[in-house]
Amino acid sequence: MKLGFIGLGIMGRPMAKNLLKAGEELLVADLNKEAVADVVAAGAEEASYTEIGEQCERIIIMVPSGAISKSILFGEGGVASTVKKGAVVCDMSSVTPVESQECYEGLKKLGVGFVDAPVSGGEPGAVAGSLAIMAGGDQEDFDAMKKYFEILGNSALLIGPSGSGSVTKLANQIIVNNNIAVVSEAFVLATKAGADPEKVYQAIRGGLAGSAVLDAKIPMIIERNFKPGGPIRINHKDIKNVVNTAHAIDVPIPYTAQLYEILQTLKIHGHMGDDHGGIVQYFEKLADVEVKKAE
């Protein structure tokens, strides 16, 4: 069975390569021809959206936004123009629940399944095949994608109906990004007060303050390594989706609304390409201090 894979960015490219390593026959598409050439060199075949719709019974999309996903599916020359009844499309992009539900309904009319299955783990998880996959949709469509989820991640769970995966990813992004912001604020305080941030980290990581975020981001921050695994631009988009979704269903989100303004400030100052550990730079600017290894 041929598998279509659309979107070969920072996450999609290593995901596609892992599928190829597992022996899957892959048709791929992306606007970035260098990325396409790289994945083709690893064993994939380049194809248009219509060719993928025509030839593939299972299709994965991994792109920056819901608007792009919908365009790929339903735009002129899109997948939906040729996709066959009984196929399943899985959007692993981070989008709003409403966008996922729109894709689900649009494809359902064609007799095509749709699963929203965003991921957590960033580029390192995509490379290692250790992503956490959170899915929404019908059980039979989730089951149809499960063999691919097992290649791409360590865990995959069907949360509920269409949109549930996207809701779960929004909750994930609230927790991750606010955690990074709070850790950043704490370490700016410690550094400004004269403490060695590396020793502060070693002292607190085994207690209740310990977390996956602390372990992942503080070593990067003190080394001033903001090479993106999860770039601020993607998290900025995700937090905007959180804010818009929360407002639409009348859920106050005071912490996350403030976080969005922090990300807006970092955008203005040119940090969108930094890893989201670079959120620390907002707090460093306020306090006029830099969190780094003691000299």
Image (cartoon, rainbow, N blue to C red):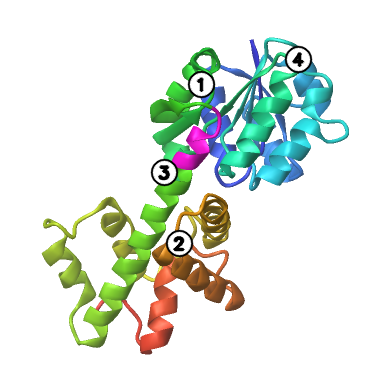
For residue 5, say whether it is visible: no
Q: Residue drawn 57% across and 78% down?
A: 269
Identify the residue position indicated by label 2 in the image. 276
Label 1: state its secondary structure: helix
Q: Position of residue 240 (x, y in %)?
A: 56, 58
Judge from the rendering whether residue 213 lies leftward or rightward of residue 123; answer left or right.
left
Judge from the rendering whether residue 19 lies leftward or rightward of residue 30; answer left or right.
left
**C-alpha span from label 2 to label 3:** 13 Å
**Is 167 contained in the magenta span?**
yes
Q: Earlier in the sequence, mark 2 or mark 4?
A: 4
**C-alpha span from label 2 to label 1:** 28 Å
- 270 vs 169: above or below: below
Q: Earlier in the sequence, mark 2 or mark 3?
A: 3
Judge from the rendering whether residue 264 lies leftward or rightward of residue 40; answer left or right.
left
Identify the residue position indicated by label 1 in the image. 148
Task: In the displayed orientation, state which residue is furthest to the bottom.
Answer: 288
- Boundaries of the magenta span: 162-168
Label 2: state its secondary structure: helix
Q: Earlier in the sequence, mark 3 or mark 1?
A: 3
Q: Amino acid at mark 4?
A: Gln
Q: Residue drawn 27% across and 59% down?
A: 214
